[in-house]
Amino acid sequence: MPADTPSRPGRRYSTFVGVAFLILIAVATLNTIRTQGGGTLGASKDERGMALPEFAVPNARTGPLNKDANIAQDDCSTSENPCPTGARLPAACEIPVSGAIRVCDLFDRPLVISFWFTRGADCLPTQDAVDRVASRYRSRVNFLSLDVRDDPSTVRQIVSERGWKIPVGYDRDGAVSDLYRVGVCPTVAFAYPGGILDFAKIGADQLSAPQLAGDVKRLLRQSRERAHEER
Protein backbone atom coordinates (compact mmCIF):
# COMPACT_ATOMS: atom_id res chain seq x y z
CA MET A 1 0.00 0.00 0.00
CA PRO A 2 1.62 3.31 -1.02
CA ALA A 3 2.37 5.85 1.65
CA ASP A 4 0.25 9.00 1.82
CA THR A 5 1.79 11.95 0.02
CA PRO A 6 2.85 14.52 2.60
CA SER A 7 1.26 17.93 2.40
CA ARG A 8 3.35 20.85 1.20
CA PRO A 9 3.36 23.72 3.70
CA GLY A 10 4.90 26.06 1.16
CA ARG A 11 1.99 25.58 -1.22
CA ARG A 12 -0.58 26.14 1.56
CA TYR A 13 1.26 29.28 2.66
CA SER A 14 1.33 30.61 -0.90
CA THR A 15 -2.39 29.96 -1.23
CA PHE A 16 -3.06 31.77 2.06
CA VAL A 17 -1.00 34.79 1.02
CA GLY A 18 -2.79 34.92 -2.33
CA VAL A 19 -6.22 34.84 -0.71
CA ALA A 20 -5.21 37.47 1.85
CA PHE A 21 -3.94 39.72 -0.94
CA LEU A 22 -7.23 39.40 -2.81
CA ILE A 23 -9.14 40.30 0.35
CA LEU A 24 -7.03 43.43 0.77
CA ILE A 25 -7.70 44.41 -2.83
CA ALA A 26 -11.43 43.90 -2.30
CA VAL A 27 -11.42 46.07 0.83
CA ALA A 28 -9.53 48.83 -0.97
CA THR A 29 -11.97 48.65 -3.87
CA LEU A 30 -14.91 49.15 -1.54
CA ASN A 31 -13.52 52.53 -0.49
CA THR A 32 -13.52 53.83 -4.04
CA ILE A 33 -15.95 54.24 -6.91
CA ARG A 34 -15.29 53.19 -10.46
CA THR A 35 -14.18 56.10 -12.61
CA GLN A 36 -12.54 56.67 -15.97
CA GLY A 37 -9.29 58.45 -16.72
CA GLY A 38 -6.35 59.50 -14.58
CA GLY A 39 -6.20 61.31 -11.22
CA THR A 40 -8.92 63.56 -9.89
CA LEU A 41 -9.43 66.88 -11.65
CA GLY A 42 -7.38 69.48 -9.82
CA ALA A 43 -4.92 67.07 -8.23
CA SER A 44 -2.31 68.13 -10.79
CA LYS A 45 -1.00 71.69 -10.74
CA ASP A 46 -1.15 71.66 -14.53
CA GLU A 47 -4.96 71.59 -14.37
CA ARG A 48 -5.33 74.52 -12.05
CA GLY A 49 -6.73 77.53 -13.84
CA MET A 50 -8.79 75.48 -16.28
CA ALA A 51 -12.54 75.88 -16.67
CA LEU A 52 -14.66 73.47 -14.66
CA PRO A 53 -16.70 71.05 -16.78
CA GLU A 54 -20.34 72.12 -16.93
CA PHE A 55 -23.13 69.88 -15.69
CA ALA A 56 -26.70 69.83 -14.48
CA VAL A 57 -28.05 67.28 -12.01
CA PRO A 58 -31.38 66.60 -10.33
CA ASN A 59 -31.90 68.45 -7.08
CA ALA A 60 -31.77 65.68 -4.46
CA ARG A 61 -34.49 67.38 -2.41
CA THR A 62 -36.99 68.45 -5.05
CA GLY A 63 -35.97 66.99 -8.40
CA PRO A 64 -36.96 63.79 -10.19
CA LEU A 65 -34.27 61.32 -9.10
CA ASN A 66 -34.92 58.95 -12.01
CA LYS A 67 -33.00 61.26 -14.36
CA ASP A 68 -29.32 61.15 -15.27
CA ALA A 69 -26.94 64.09 -15.15
CA ASN A 70 -26.52 66.30 -18.21
CA ILE A 71 -22.84 66.91 -19.01
CA ALA A 72 -23.24 68.48 -22.47
CA GLN A 73 -20.92 71.48 -22.74
CA ASP A 74 -22.04 74.79 -24.23
CA ASP A 75 -19.63 74.51 -27.17
CA CYS A 76 -18.87 70.92 -28.08
CA SER A 77 -16.72 71.85 -31.06
CA THR A 78 -14.15 73.85 -29.10
CA SER A 79 -14.65 72.93 -25.43
CA GLU A 80 -11.69 71.49 -23.53
CA ASN A 81 -14.16 69.19 -21.81
CA PRO A 82 -15.77 66.21 -23.55
CA CYS A 83 -19.35 66.12 -24.77
CA PRO A 84 -21.64 63.10 -24.58
CA THR A 85 -21.72 60.86 -27.62
CA GLY A 86 -24.94 60.16 -29.47
CA ALA A 87 -27.83 62.53 -29.94
CA ARG A 88 -27.06 66.20 -29.36
CA LEU A 89 -28.35 67.28 -25.96
CA PRO A 90 -29.11 70.82 -24.89
CA ALA A 91 -26.15 72.24 -23.02
CA ALA A 92 -26.25 71.46 -19.32
CA CYS A 93 -26.56 75.11 -18.38
CA GLU A 94 -29.40 75.68 -20.84
CA ILE A 95 -31.88 73.15 -19.45
CA PRO A 96 -34.91 74.34 -17.42
CA VAL A 97 -33.87 75.04 -13.87
CA SER A 98 -36.95 73.57 -12.20
CA GLY A 99 -35.98 70.47 -10.19
CA ALA A 100 -32.35 70.74 -11.31
CA ILE A 101 -29.09 72.24 -10.14
CA ARG A 102 -26.98 73.82 -12.89
CA VAL A 103 -23.39 74.32 -11.88
CA CYS A 104 -23.13 77.44 -14.05
CA ASP A 105 -25.63 79.17 -11.77
CA LEU A 106 -23.06 78.85 -8.99
CA PHE A 107 -20.21 80.46 -10.91
CA ASP A 108 -21.00 84.00 -9.70
CA ARG A 109 -18.94 83.42 -6.54
CA PRO A 110 -16.11 81.18 -5.41
CA LEU A 111 -17.43 77.63 -5.47
CA VAL A 112 -16.87 74.49 -3.40
CA ILE A 113 -18.09 71.14 -4.78
CA SER A 114 -17.96 68.11 -2.49
CA PHE A 115 -18.53 64.57 -3.84
CA TRP A 116 -19.79 61.71 -1.67
CA PHE A 117 -21.21 58.18 -1.77
CA THR A 118 -22.12 55.54 0.82
CA ARG A 119 -20.98 52.26 -0.72
CA GLY A 120 -18.07 50.93 1.30
CA ALA A 121 -16.83 54.31 2.47
CA ASP A 122 -17.70 56.73 5.26
CA CYS A 123 -18.02 60.01 3.39
CA LEU A 124 -20.70 61.53 5.59
CA PRO A 125 -18.59 63.12 8.38
CA THR A 126 -16.82 65.27 5.79
CA GLN A 127 -20.19 66.25 4.31
CA ASP A 128 -21.36 67.27 7.78
CA ALA A 129 -18.26 69.46 8.03
CA VAL A 130 -18.87 70.95 4.57
CA ASP A 131 -22.43 71.83 5.59
CA ARG A 132 -21.24 73.55 8.78
CA VAL A 133 -18.63 75.56 6.91
CA ALA A 134 -21.17 76.47 4.22
CA SER A 135 -23.44 78.00 6.85
CA ARG A 136 -20.60 80.34 7.85
CA TYR A 137 -19.54 81.41 4.36
CA ARG A 138 -22.77 81.18 2.35
CA SER A 139 -22.89 84.96 1.81
CA ARG A 140 -19.50 84.87 0.06
CA VAL A 141 -19.07 81.34 -1.33
CA ASN A 142 -21.37 78.92 -3.14
CA PHE A 143 -21.40 75.29 -2.05
CA LEU A 144 -22.68 72.13 -3.74
CA SER A 145 -22.78 68.62 -2.30
CA LEU A 146 -23.02 65.90 -4.95
CA ASP A 147 -24.00 62.29 -4.29
CA VAL A 148 -22.69 59.67 -6.72
CA ARG A 149 -24.76 56.63 -7.69
CA ASP A 150 -26.52 55.92 -4.39
CA ASP A 151 -30.13 54.76 -4.20
CA PRO A 152 -32.45 57.80 -4.51
CA SER A 153 -34.38 57.02 -1.34
CA THR A 154 -31.11 56.62 0.56
CA VAL A 155 -29.90 60.02 -0.61
CA ARG A 156 -33.07 61.82 0.45
CA GLN A 157 -33.13 60.03 3.78
CA ILE A 158 -29.52 60.99 4.53
CA VAL A 159 -30.04 64.64 3.59
CA SER A 160 -33.15 64.82 5.78
CA GLU A 161 -31.75 62.95 8.79
CA ARG A 162 -28.49 64.91 8.90
CA GLY A 163 -30.26 68.23 8.47
CA TRP A 164 -28.00 69.58 5.74
CA LYS A 165 -28.84 73.04 4.41
CA ILE A 166 -26.31 72.94 1.57
CA PRO A 167 -27.68 72.34 -1.97
CA VAL A 168 -27.42 68.62 -2.78
CA GLY A 169 -27.35 67.23 -6.31
CA TYR A 170 -27.74 63.63 -7.46
CA ASP A 171 -25.36 62.06 -9.99
CA ARG A 172 -27.38 58.90 -10.67
CA ASP A 173 -25.22 57.35 -13.40
CA GLY A 174 -21.88 58.76 -12.26
CA ALA A 175 -21.44 60.93 -15.36
CA VAL A 176 -20.31 63.95 -13.36
CA SER A 177 -17.95 61.93 -11.17
CA ASP A 178 -16.41 60.47 -14.34
CA LEU A 179 -16.08 63.95 -15.81
CA TYR A 180 -14.31 65.17 -12.67
CA ARG A 181 -12.46 61.83 -12.32
CA VAL A 182 -13.64 61.28 -8.75
CA GLY A 183 -12.52 57.95 -7.32
CA VAL A 184 -12.43 58.38 -3.54
CA CYS A 185 -13.97 60.41 -0.80
CA PRO A 186 -13.43 62.95 0.43
CA THR A 187 -13.02 64.77 -2.88
CA VAL A 188 -13.63 68.51 -2.71
CA ALA A 189 -13.04 70.93 -5.60
CA PHE A 190 -12.45 74.65 -5.02
CA ALA A 191 -13.03 77.11 -7.88
CA TYR A 192 -12.66 80.83 -8.50
CA PRO A 193 -15.65 82.92 -9.59
CA GLY A 194 -16.44 82.08 -13.18
CA GLY A 195 -15.95 78.36 -12.59
CA ILE A 196 -12.15 78.37 -12.86
CA LEU A 197 -10.44 75.56 -10.96
CA ASP A 198 -8.18 76.63 -8.09
CA PHE A 199 -7.36 73.38 -6.26
CA ALA A 200 -8.83 70.13 -4.99
CA LYS A 201 -8.57 68.12 -1.79
CA ILE A 202 -8.47 64.33 -2.17
CA GLY A 203 -7.69 61.73 0.44
CA ALA A 204 -8.68 58.74 2.52
CA ASP A 205 -9.01 60.70 5.79
CA GLN A 206 -11.99 62.80 6.76
CA LEU A 207 -11.73 66.57 6.43
CA SER A 208 -12.69 68.51 9.54
CA ALA A 209 -14.61 71.76 9.67
CA PRO A 210 -11.48 73.73 10.71
CA GLN A 211 -9.53 72.22 7.78
CA LEU A 212 -12.29 73.10 5.32
CA ALA A 213 -12.68 76.58 6.77
CA GLY A 214 -8.97 77.10 6.19
CA ASP A 215 -9.35 75.94 2.59
CA VAL A 216 -12.29 78.30 2.05
CA LYS A 217 -10.28 81.22 3.46
CA ARG A 218 -7.47 80.29 1.06
CA LEU A 219 -9.96 80.21 -1.84
CA LEU A 220 -11.35 83.63 -0.90
CA ARG A 221 -7.86 85.13 -0.58
CA GLN A 222 -6.68 83.71 -3.90
CA SER A 223 -9.92 84.79 -5.59
CA ARG A 224 -9.31 88.39 -4.44
CA GLU A 225 -5.71 88.24 -5.64
CA ARG A 226 -6.79 86.85 -9.00
CA ALA A 227 -9.45 89.53 -9.43
CA HIS A 228 -6.88 92.23 -8.61
CA GLU A 229 -4.42 90.84 -11.17
CA GLU A 230 -7.09 90.84 -13.89
CA ARG A 231 -7.92 94.51 -13.47
Image: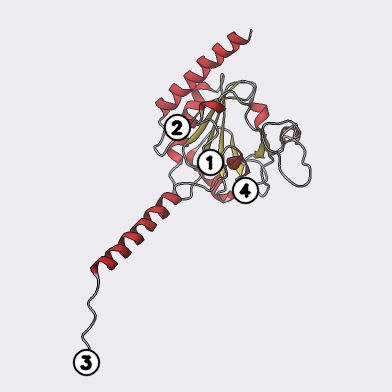
Q: What residue is pinned by disc 1?
A: 159
**Callout 1: 10 Å neighbours few (<14), some, many (20+)?**
some
Q: Residues under labels 2 and 4: Cα distance?
A: 26 Å
Mark 3 residue element: loop
Q: What residue is pinned by disc 3?
A: 1
Q: Residues under labels 4 and 3: Cα distance?
A: 64 Å
Q: Earlier in the sequence, mark 4 or mark 3?
A: 3
**Callout 4: 10 Å neighbours few (<14), some, many (20+)?**
some
Whole-percent x, y for residue 27 in the image: 40, 52
Q: Earlier in the sequence, mark 1 or mark 4?
A: 1
Q: Residues under labels 2 and 3: Cα distance?
A: 72 Å
Q: Please give the name of the residue rendered at 31% of the width and 59% of the height, measured from the top-left corner.
A: 17
Mark 4 residue element: loop
Q: Which amino acid, mark 1?
A: Val
Q: Residues under labels 1 and 4: Cα distance?
A: 19 Å
Q: Earlier in the sequence, mark 2 or mark 1?
A: 2
From the image, state whether disc 2 or disc 4 is nearer to you. Answer: 4
Label 3–label 1 contact, CB within 8 A? no
Q: Earlier in the sequence, mark 2 or mark 4?
A: 2
Q: Residues under labels 3 and 1: Cα distance?
A: 71 Å
Q: What residue is pinned by disc 4?
A: 173
Q: Which amino acid, mark 3?
A: Met
Mark 2 residue element: helix
In the figure, is residue 34 to the left or right of 95? Answer: left
Asked which quadrant contains residue 205, the reply is top left
From the image, state whether disc 1 or disc 4 is nearer to you. Answer: 4
Whole-percent x, y for residue 76 in the image: 74, 35
Q: What residue is pinned by disc 2?
A: 129
Q: Which amino acid, mark 2?
A: Ala
